[in-house]
Image (tube, rainbow, N blue to C red):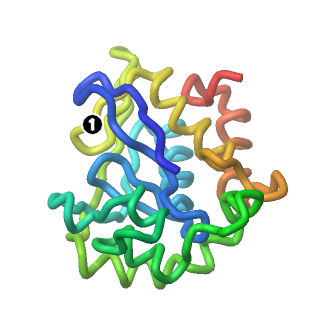
Amino acid sequence: MPLAFQSTSHGTIAFGFFNIEIDMLLLDRLFFLAGDFCAAVIGLARDGAAEIQGWRIEDPSRIGNLHGAIAGDDLSGFIGVGYERFPFPADPAGFKQSPEGSANNAWAAELIAGFGSAETIALRWDRQAGQVCIAELVFAEPGFGELVGYVDRGGYPRWRDGQRPAHVRAMMQSLLELGSVLAPRR
């Protein structure tokens, strides 16, 4: 479930996983695969810049209503169609982010292409200013670290059985090896 995070450019914005069976993240109106985000974070920490191939959905009605989709009452928009295929679990104990969600990446990418436009999303780290930009969204380094920490935990509700996907483990290992300030605070 996406949570509210503080940006320095746009105030409070939503970031996170939006369906436990889909390994995709939303950031305001941007969407990208979690594995691509993890790879970009590694590149950002190493080189100060990276890119993600993702999508932008400007019209909120084309994004959908997350709470309505979870309830099964409003299956409109991209998020709603995702919940039509992968409904919210009837048993609350089943509400855990799937570490195998990347198996649904091709389906999710095909679906989102009908709702949004493909976009190359630039990530830039201004070390002197202590800021990270994702497209037009700007985060202080600690705020960006909170986004990384969210992905590492599997968001809310966390990874099923505590099992992180390989791309998340690789991101965290790289940040540790680089001694990066972009790593989440523990």
In front here: 34 or 129?
34
In front here: 93 or 41?
93
In front here: 185 or 29?
29
Element at label 1: strand
Tell me which residue sits at (69%, 65%) in the image: 98
Tell me if mark 1 has few (under 14), some (14-19) or many (20+) residues whose alpha carbon lies within 10 angstroms of its own: some
- Image coords of residue 141 (percent x, y): 46, 22
On-image quarter of the C terminus: top right
Tell me which residue sits at (55%, 74%) in the image: 87
For residue 68, above or below residue 103: above
For residue 144, above or below residue 174: above
- Image coords of residue 64 (percent x, y): 30, 64
Which residue carries the number 1 mark? Answer: 137
In front here: 185 or 162?
162
**Count of marks overlaid on the render:** 1
- Image coords of residue 7 (percent x, y): 33, 27
Q: Quadrant of residue 108?
A: bottom left
- Image coords of residue 39 (percent x, y): 54, 54
Tell me which residue sits at (42%, 34%) in the image: 4
**Left or right: 49, with 33 as reference point:** left
Badge 1 amino acid? Leu
